[in-house]
Image (spheres, grey):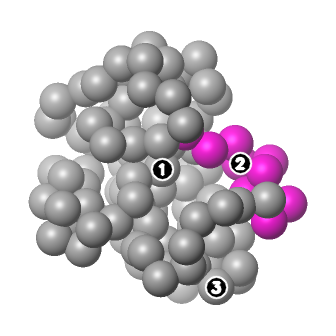
Amino acid sequence: MVDTILAKDVLSIAVEQNALVIDVRDYESFRKGHIPMAIWMDLEEIKRGNIKIRKNRPLIVYCERGSTSMLAVKELNKLGYHAMSVIGGLRQYKGPIARNNKF
């Protein structure tokens, strides 16, 4: 079972829980526009367990439509993180969009 959140709640949950927002789309898509506060992570790096994030911080993970983020969340949870997937991904998100942030 994977924890999920609604796209409309991403920013409020991120602030309330001090959660890290992670975009798992391709880097070019991230660069063109992403949820504010988000960092980019490569799904393959997540699958390899090559992650340098504290495990005590909640993670909010999104992609374009929600299916890739579900895979990422399953992998992160196996590694001991508390990760949540955004239902419907960026397509359902109607809030502000940031550009050009780098991790």
SS at circle 2: helix
Q: Horizontally, is 66 left or right of 37 in the view?
A: right
Q: From where the camera sits, is residue 63 visible?
A: no
Do callouts 2 and 1 mark residues in contact (Cβ within 8 Å)? no
> What numbered label is drawn on residue 80?
3
Upstream in sequence: badge 3 or badge 2: 2
Upstream in sequence: badge 2 or badge 1: 1
Upstream in sequence: badge 1 or badge 3: 1
Q: Residue visible at 16% across and 70% down?
A: 16
Above or below 82: residue 76: above
Hey, what amino acid is under mark 3? Gly
The crowding category of the residue bearing disc 3, from other C-alpha atoms within 10 Å (few below 14, some 14 to 19, many at least 20), is few
Part of the protein shown in magenta: 40-49
Q: Main secondary structure of the magenta part?
A: helix
Above or below 18: residue 61: above
Residue picked out by circle 1 = 22
> What numbered label is drawn on residue 43?
2
Q: Horizontally, is 13 left or right of 29 in the view?
A: left
Q: Quadrant of the N terminus?
A: bottom right
Residue 75 inside the magenta-drawn segment: no
Q: Residue visible at 25% across and 26% down?
A: 97
Hey, what amino acid is under mark 1? Ile
Q: Nearer the viewer, residue 56 or 23?
A: 56
Q: Quadrant of the C terminus?
A: top right
